[in-house]
Image (spheres, helix red, strand yellow):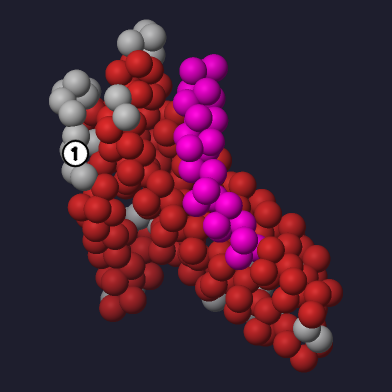
Amino acid sequence: MKAVLLIALNFVREQRWPILVLLVWVVLLDVLGLSIDLRRSREDLLFLFKQIGIYVVAFSIFFGGSAIYNERKTRRILAVLSKSIARKQYLSGLVTGVTAASGIYCFALGITGSWTLAPGGFPIHQVWFLMLSLVCACMLAGTVALMFSTFLNPFIAAGATAAMLGLPALAARLWTEQWGYVIPVYPLTMNVVNATFDSPGHPSWKLIALAILETLFFWIISAQIFSYVDIAVAVE
């Protein structure tokens, strides 16, 4: 467990600049919340809040898709795995790191949403449930990207992840919403997109549980694939 946490902390440290860029958007939302008349512009503020929140899902795909590549490029992965750390532990650390990086952003956004949206009538508890939905969506999306990154370069892995997440979303739009549950990143993000002051939504713990189970599923697949990868081969 200690090794997993250390790998996760190191991942977050390496991604500090992308995380900082994300947090700048949160600061801008803070400034906007202080400078506008909430009674007249609360819908605009909520729109920006939701838009800024969705960014982190895309970032989590790039976080997961580039993690192994960056580690192999710097040869750091060889040093880590030479210390009696199993490849499953290594991947667990990366998944935890992606989740933690996304969680930092969602926590900051949740604090901002609590004090900027609550005066306009948006329930604080729903703000935090939306943030939990985003974290779970990021965790699952990042793990799918990590799975593809075990055998693809980061750009192709990101494209493959977008396709894999997009197909159930497209099917849900064209036919029935149940297709979205195949990989529930889409319905989790739509919980955020569809939230309004009049209808902030209702917590769906089934989606949260499903996202956690599928994260475990894709982690197992990633570990199986990664066990056959020759990490000693240099990448360009």
Tell me where residue 222 sits by quadrant.
Answer: top left
Look at the numbered disc 1 and give the secondary structure of its residue: loop
Q: Is 215 colored magenta in this rendering?
A: no
* Residue 219 image position (x, y, % from top left): 34, 35
Q: In this view of the protein, can residue 161 be seen by the observer? A: no
Q: Which quadrant does the C terminus fall into?
A: top left
Q: Is residue 209 above or below residue 163?
A: above
Q: Quickly name the residue at label 1.
A: 236
Task: Identify the residue shown where x is 41% and y is 59%.
Answer: 58
By secondary structure, the bulk of the magenta-drawn segment is best described as helix
Q: Is residue 214 above or below residue 43?
A: above
* Residue 4 image position (x, y, % from top left): 48, 23
Relative side of 111 to 93, left or right: right
Residue reaching furthest right?
Answer: 119
Relative side of 110 to 59, left or right: right
* Residue 60 image position (x, y, % from top left): 43, 51
* Residue 229 image position (x, y, % from top left): 17, 26
Nearest to the observer: residue 47 or residue 26:
26
Q: Is 25 colored magenta in this rendering?
A: yes
Q: In this view of the protein, can residue 95 be seen by the observer? A: yes
Residue span colored magenta:
1-26
Task: Identify the residue shown where x is 55% and y is 57%.
Answer: 21
Task: Identify the residue shown where x is 29% and y is 60%.
Answer: 162
Relative side of 130 to 158, left or right: right
Mark 1 burial class by Cα count in 10 Å: few <14, some 14-19, many 20+: few
Q: Amino acid at mark 1?
A: Glu
How many numbered discs sit on the rendered protein?
1
Nearest to the observer: residue 24 or residue 33:
24
Tell me where residue 25 sits by quadrant.
Answer: bottom right
